[in-house]
Amino acid sequence: MQIIASIAPIFIVILFGVIGGKRGLIPESFQKPANKLAFNFAFPALLINAIGRTHVSDFWQPVQLAITMGAMLFCWLVSWQLSRVFFKNNESTRPTWIQTSVHGNYGFVGLAVILYALGDPGVAASGLLVGVMSILQNAITVITLSYLAGTKAKPLEQVKAIATNPIIIAILIGLTISFLGIDISGVVGRTLKIMGGMGVPLALLIIGAKLGETRIKAPLPMLALPMLMKLFILPALAWGLLSMFGYSGLLLTTAVLIVASPTATLSVVFADQMGGDSDFASTMVSLTTALSALTFSLWLMVLVP
């Protein structure tokens, strides 16, 4: 019960976001700038503060990174093969079906759960993993949509987007501070804590408001397998492989929680811009986010003694 109580406020705030959105308290005119504020300032501050206070050797785990990346790549390839069975000619839904089965909301939902369930040590331990996995899943998404939806990707634009991503930049700054042993416990640290503290509640309210606007526009049987892959199969595979290689405690828990994150809202943007099915992606985001209240609780009960 203590585990559930630690993350319950996250989903209660999301529920308030749903209510606020439906009552016009969180309009679209607020959502976009607030989302930019959280993404460009608040979450980077949270990551810099958490990673910068931790010694780099505590979270530099190349084997953990490789295993977690391998689990995602395997599930992506399995989804690709399974899509051949379910789709014949639907060129827009098939690539979206594949990419939403592995593309997770690490930044807003995954880090929020880790922060409230495991505290700043959990955020620090997951920071590098979030950065690497974010790059990998964006590459997977671009490859899938380019190949199956027939939309030509622009490599230079993708590289620029990754290089200027505030989350990636924040992780690199945090790693540099940690490696050089710079003390950020004073004014800088307190400033980062204040800025980082507004990120999670702001992001959760926005997620809730967007959930309230979503309508299910895809058949539930078609949604079942990618939801199962995203919330159960991928994290279960990562858990099994990491345990096999001797990982436990914080490093195991953070890796599993990261890949257990619900489908990312960015998957809707990719689908819309690269010829995918944005309605299907939007439905996946809503359903996996709602179900993740249950699945995160189950994973925490399994992983945390």
Image (spheres, rainbow, N blue to C red):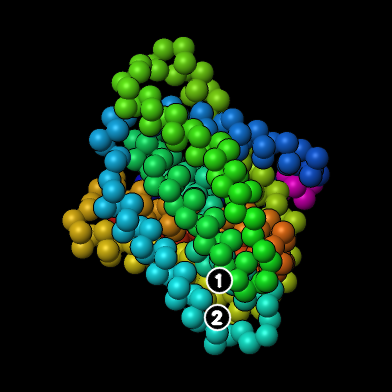
Where is residue 94? Give x, y as percent: 62, 76
- Going from N to C along the chain, the mark reached first, 2 or 1, is 2
Q: Is residue 71 above or below residue 212?
A: below
In this orientation, does residue 90 appear?
Answer: yes
Give the quarter of the image for residue 145: bottom right
Q: Residues within 10 Å of mark 2 (few under 14, many from 20)?
A: some
Q: Nearer the viewer, residue 209 or 272?
A: 272
The label shown at residue 258 is: none
Q: Nearer the viewer, residue 41 or 249?
A: 41
Name which residue type carries label 2: Ser
Span of residues in magenta: 19-23
The label shown at residue 83 is: 2
* Secondary structure, magenta segment, majority class: helix
Find disc 1 in the rendering and name its residue: 98
Question: Which residue does the image show at 21% across and 63% down from the upper left?
Answer: 244
Where is residue 266? Give x, y as percent: 62, 53
Per the image, label 2 sits on a secondary structure element best described as: helix
